[in-house]
Image (cartoon, rainbow, N blue to C red):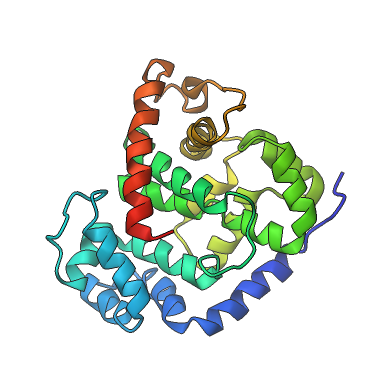
Amino acid sequence: MNTAGVDVDALLTGLDQMASQRPVAAQIVATSNNDNTGATELAAILGADVALAAKVMKLANSAYFGLSGKVTGLPFAVTVVGFNTVRAIATVSLSGIDRAEVLPAGFWDTSIHLAAAAGSLGPAFQETTADAMCLGLLAQLGAALLHHNDVEGYDQLVATTSLGQERFIAETCRYGISTPQVTAEALQQWHFPAPMVGALRAVQAGPEGALLRTAYEVTARLLEPGHKVVSIGGLSQNRIPDSQAAARLAAVRADVKALRAALGL
């Protein structure tokens, strides 16, 4: 039963209002959707926001991308991290979650771990590391929006459910929609690529959601000591054998450290 309800249209209208306060971020998100946009053009727009430009430069020069200290120009930095990464960083600013005073418990820990997990697992799903990392980084945007709409209720939900399918079911019962689905609606409104939106919508069921489902399981194992383990082989549709789970967790831990330092989150 939907006990609290949520007006998704109202949430998305609020995001549009935020976009008007962050014009450079909004322009980056809009421009990066254009297939005719080049790295030089996107870098020129990015350069108008010193904080966003610095974040992209820092990420391009991070251990995560393996080019520490070698990226000196913004156009090259855009090429190194990829358009989707630039768009994801701009979206974090556009949505205001990087400056929000109140977020769900452990929000950024979860988001950074999801980004690292999805990026690490991405190639097994025929996704580039950068694009998969972006999917993980933005996946929890919906949680921030649901929390903003129902602070006490959402805090209780987080405290009584495990990250992943259990929480998605609880969110759907309470709000009629889950975190990834809210994120999908926001990204569709901002004209993100259809495969990314589809992956978020299918995270509870469907082959398109397998990467993100597996990333949530990896994140839960790393962050929640009492988490009830679910087969990674099953969640990943046998792309990641359960025998590789320990090695995958170790790799994600290392990537979390690099991403946290690079993104400053």
Q: Residue at x 15, y 64 (%)?
A: 71
**Which x, y percent locates residue 29?**
43, 71
Q: Is residue 229 above or below residue 200?
A: above
Task: Tally the numbered discs.
Answer: 0
173 to the left or right of 168: right
Q: Is residue 126 visible?
A: no
| Residue placed furthest toward the top | 243
Q: Is residue 13 above or below residue 109?
A: below
In the picture, which quadrant includes the N terminus? Answer: top right
**Which x, y percent locates residue 101?**
61, 67
Q: Residue at x 38, y 52 (%)?
A: 260
**Which x, y percent locates residue 127?**
34, 42
**Which x, y percent locates residue 226?**
62, 26
Q: Is residue 203 visible?
A: yes
Instruction: Work out whether residue 240 or residue 145 is closer to the camera in this orientation and state it.
Output: 145
62 to the left or right of 90: left
Q: Residue at x 45, y 43 (%)?
A: 113
Instruction: Work out whether residue 217 or residue 233 is closer to the camera in this orientation and state it.
Output: 217
Q: Is residue 149 above or below residue 111?
A: below
In the picture, which quadrant includes the C terminus? Answer: bottom left
99 to the left or right of 154: left
Q: Is residue 39 above or below residue 123?
A: below
Q: Residue at x 61, y 59 (%)?
A: 185
174 to the left or right of 122: right
Instruction: Work out whether residue 100 or residue 245 is closer to the camera in this orientation and state it.
Output: 100
